Protein backbone atom coordinates (compact mmCIF):
# COMPACT_ATOMS: atom_id res chain seq x y z
CA UNK A 1 0.00 0.00 0.00
CA UNK A 2 1.38 3.46 -0.90
CA UNK A 3 2.09 4.74 2.64
CA UNK A 4 3.35 8.24 1.67
CA UNK A 5 0.25 8.81 -0.45
CA UNK A 6 -1.99 7.53 2.34
CA UNK A 7 -0.44 10.12 4.64
CA UNK A 8 -1.01 12.81 1.99
CA UNK A 9 -4.68 11.85 1.64
CA UNK A 10 -5.10 11.82 5.42
CA UNK A 11 -3.53 15.28 5.72
CA UNK A 12 -5.83 16.62 3.00
CA UNK A 13 -8.92 15.15 4.69
CA UNK A 14 -7.91 16.69 8.01
CA UNK A 15 -7.52 20.06 6.28
CA UNK A 16 -10.95 19.74 4.66
CA UNK A 17 -12.50 18.77 8.00
CA UNK A 18 -10.49 21.55 9.69
CA UNK A 19 -9.53 18.99 12.35
CA UNK A 20 -5.82 18.17 12.54
CA UNK A 21 -6.52 15.62 15.29
CA UNK A 22 -9.17 13.66 13.37
CA UNK A 23 -8.69 9.89 13.70
CA UNK A 24 -8.15 8.80 10.09
CA UNK A 25 -6.41 5.65 8.84
CA UNK A 26 -6.05 3.80 5.54
CA UNK A 27 -9.28 1.96 6.34
CA UNK A 28 -11.32 5.10 7.06
CA UNK A 29 -14.40 5.20 4.85
CA UNK A 30 -14.62 8.31 2.73
CA UNK A 31 -18.27 8.32 1.70
CA UNK A 32 -21.50 6.51 2.45
CA UNK A 33 -22.52 5.19 5.83
CA UNK A 34 -19.86 6.11 8.39
CA UNK A 35 -17.99 8.09 5.72
CA UNK A 36 -15.89 11.05 6.84
CA UNK A 37 -16.70 13.32 3.88
CA UNK A 38 -19.88 14.74 2.43
CA UNK A 39 -20.13 15.21 -1.33
CA UNK A 40 -18.55 18.67 -1.25
CA UNK A 41 -15.71 17.39 0.91
CA UNK A 42 -15.07 14.56 -1.53
CA UNK A 43 -14.98 16.95 -4.47
CA UNK A 44 -12.61 19.23 -2.55
CA UNK A 45 -10.33 16.28 -1.82
CA UNK A 46 -10.31 15.16 -5.45
CA UNK A 47 -9.58 18.67 -6.71
CA UNK A 48 -6.67 18.88 -4.29
CA UNK A 49 -5.41 15.49 -5.54
CA UNK A 50 -5.64 16.82 -9.10
CA UNK A 51 -3.40 19.72 -8.03
CA UNK A 52 -0.91 17.37 -6.36
CA UNK A 53 -0.86 15.22 -9.51
CA UNK A 54 -0.29 18.25 -11.71
CA UNK A 55 2.67 19.25 -9.52
CA UNK A 56 3.99 15.69 -10.00
CA UNK A 57 3.57 15.90 -13.78
CA UNK A 58 0.51 13.77 -14.48
CA UNK A 59 -3.27 14.02 -14.58
CA UNK A 60 -5.33 12.39 -11.83
CA UNK A 61 -8.68 11.28 -13.29
CA UNK A 62 -11.15 10.74 -10.46
CA UNK A 63 -14.13 10.84 -12.83
CA UNK A 64 -13.21 7.68 -14.75
CA UNK A 65 -15.66 4.81 -15.16
CA UNK A 66 -13.58 2.71 -12.76
CA UNK A 67 -13.54 5.45 -10.15
CA UNK A 68 -17.29 5.89 -10.33
CA UNK A 69 -18.12 2.16 -10.29
CA UNK A 70 -20.00 1.26 -7.11
CA UNK A 71 -18.55 -2.24 -6.92
CA UNK A 72 -14.90 -1.16 -7.28
CA UNK A 73 -15.10 2.44 -6.14
CA UNK A 74 -11.76 4.07 -5.42
CA UNK A 75 -13.67 6.14 -2.88
CA UNK A 76 -14.29 3.18 -0.53
CA UNK A 77 -11.60 4.31 1.88
CA UNK A 78 -8.40 6.31 2.21
CA UNK A 79 -6.23 3.37 1.14
CA UNK A 80 -8.19 2.64 -2.05
CA UNK A 81 -8.03 6.29 -3.11
CA UNK A 82 -4.30 6.49 -2.39
CA UNK A 83 -3.73 3.25 -4.33
CA UNK A 84 -5.65 4.58 -7.34
CA UNK A 85 -3.65 7.82 -7.26
CA UNK A 86 -0.39 5.85 -7.25
CA UNK A 87 -1.62 3.52 -10.01
CA UNK A 88 -2.43 6.49 -12.22
CA UNK A 89 0.97 8.02 -11.44
CA UNK A 90 2.67 4.74 -12.44
CA UNK A 91 0.67 4.48 -15.69
CA UNK A 92 1.59 8.04 -16.58
CA UNK A 93 5.27 7.35 -15.95
CA UNK A 94 5.29 4.19 -18.10
Image (cartoon, grey):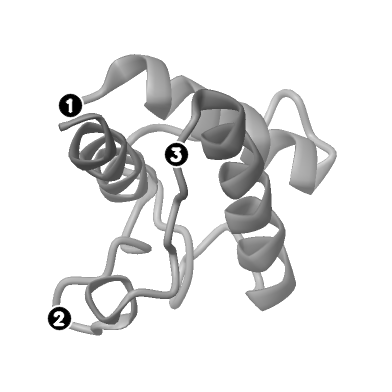
Could you tell me residue 89's position as x and y percent? 31, 35
Residue 2, picture quadrant: top left
Residue 6, picture quadrant: top left
Q: Any mark on residue 37, and which? A: none
Q: CA distance from mark 2 to mark 1?
A: 20 Å
Quadrant where the image shows the N terminus: top left
Q: Any mark on residue 1, and which? A: 1
In the rendered image of this protein, does residue 93 appear above or below residue 91?
Answer: above
Which dot, 3 or 2, sits closer to the camera?
3
Q: Any mark on residue 58, and which? A: 3
In the rendered structure, which disc, 2 or 1, sits on the residue that comes first in sequence? Answer: 1
For the point 31% across and 71% down, which residue is it? Answer: 67
Residue 91, picture quadrant: top left
Label 1: how many Cα within 10 Å (few below 14, some 14–19, many 20+)? few
8 relative position to 6: left or right: right
Which dot, 3 or 1, sits closer to the camera?
3
Label 2: how many Cα within 10 Å (few below 14, some 14–19, many 20+)? few
Judging depth in this view, the residue of 90 and 48 nearest the camera is 90
In the rendered structure, which disc, 3 or 2, sits on the residue that comes first in sequence? Answer: 3
61 relative position to 40: left or right: left
Could you tell me residue 24's position as x and y percent? 50, 35
Q: CA distance from mark 3 to mark 2?
A: 26 Å
State the residue position of label 2: 71
Amino acid sequence: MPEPMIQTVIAEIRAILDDEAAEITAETRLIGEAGRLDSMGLVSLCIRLEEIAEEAGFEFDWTSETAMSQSRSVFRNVGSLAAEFEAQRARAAA
